[in-house]
Amino acid sequence: MPTVLITGANRGLGLEFVRQYQAEGWEVIATARQRSPELMAVGVRVEQLDMSDLDAVASFSAGVNRLDLLIANAGTYGPREAADADEAREWLGTFAVNTIAPYLLAKAVLPPVRAAGGKLIAISTRMGSIADNTSGGFLAYRSSKTALNMAWRTLALAERDLTCVVLHPGWVQTRMGGANAPVTPGESIRGMRRVIDGLMPKDSGEFFDYQGQRVPW
Ligand SMILES: NC(=O)c1ccc[n+]([C@@H]2O[C@H](COP(=O)([O-])OP(=O)(O)OC[C@H]3O[C@@H](n4cnc5c(N)ncnc54)[C@H](OP(=O)(O)O)[C@@H]3O)[C@@H](O)[C@H]2O)c1
């Protein structure tokens, strides 16, 4: 039975990843900073992990010998601007959660991922694409996801036997995406699971959306 580790699993896309992989028969390890009734109802192993606690992230152990898949999903918007030093510090906090913690977590679980010849996936966003940024705004979110993309490409080049990819889930109906988003969590996760399943070693270091289309950097 393959094993997947999913962060930010208490709601939104993380919870839907948990539900779908569990339904497919995977062993699921879910992390969340707070357990939600919805997550506990799925009946998978849940570990408390706040992605802003970099010591906890760096020392995280999945407690397994083989890990087939990491999905670094947890993410946060952060401040829309950095008008003063307080907002700038919040921006730094956004980098901790969206950029540095996923990278640190990937490094922390490398031994079981290497043992499984596994895949390391980070949930990024088209909003982190410099080429795609024609409207501006969302300073902390955009810049932290752009940096996540670069961190993941660097990871891919260091771990040439693994498959390391960043994914854009679409604009999805979650607390972050809002009710007007055109894509349901079910559709987004079914699409991303299909993309992840089909990834080949040559895809490592690349950026795809939930329908398998390449996203410009
Ligand atoms: N929805 C979209 O349209 C969309 C589009 C592009 C990319 N994404 C990306 O998809 C991923 C999931 O987003 P979503 O749409 O599911 O958003 P969401 O409903 O707002 O869920 C965000 C998840 O991240 C967790 N999280 C935030 N800060 C955390 C921290 N410090 N430690 C641990 N967990 C933390 C949240 O946990 P709490 O409940 O504890 O806050 C929650 O589980 C994110 O990386 C996001 O950037 C979403």
Image: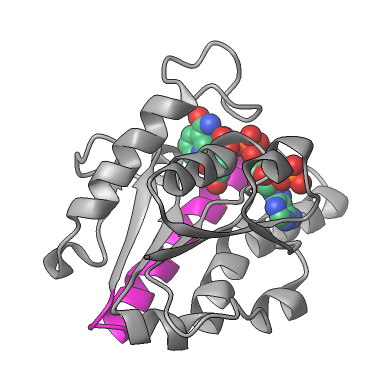
The kind of secondary structure the magenta stretch mainly shows is helix
Residue 37 x/y as whole percent: 78, 37
List the single residue furthest toward the right: 86
Q: Quadrant of the N terminus?
A: bottom left
Q: Which of 179 and 157 is in front in this view?
A: 179
Residue 64 x/y as whole percent: 53, 80
Q: In this view, does 56 lie to the left or right of 206?
A: right
Give the mark count: 0
Q: Nearer the viewer, residue 72 or 31?
A: 31
Quarter of the figure with residue 36: top right
214 in relation to 99, above or below:
above
Q: Which of 193 and 93 is in front in this view?
A: 193
Residue 41 x/y as whole percent: 69, 39
Which residue occupies 18% across, 53% down? 198
210 in relation to 159, above or below:
above
Q: Does the magenta stretch include residue 161?
A: yes
Q: Is residue 154 visible?
A: yes
State the colouring used for the structure image.
Answer: one colour
Residue 98 x/y as whole percent: 60, 56
The magenta segment is 133-162
Question: On the rendering, which quadrant does ligand 1 occupy?
Answer: top right
Which residue occupies 61% across, 51% down? 74
Which residue occupies 50% across, 52% down? 145
Q: Is residue 81 visible?
A: no
Q: Does the magenta stretch include residue 60?
A: no
71 in relation to 15, above or below:
below
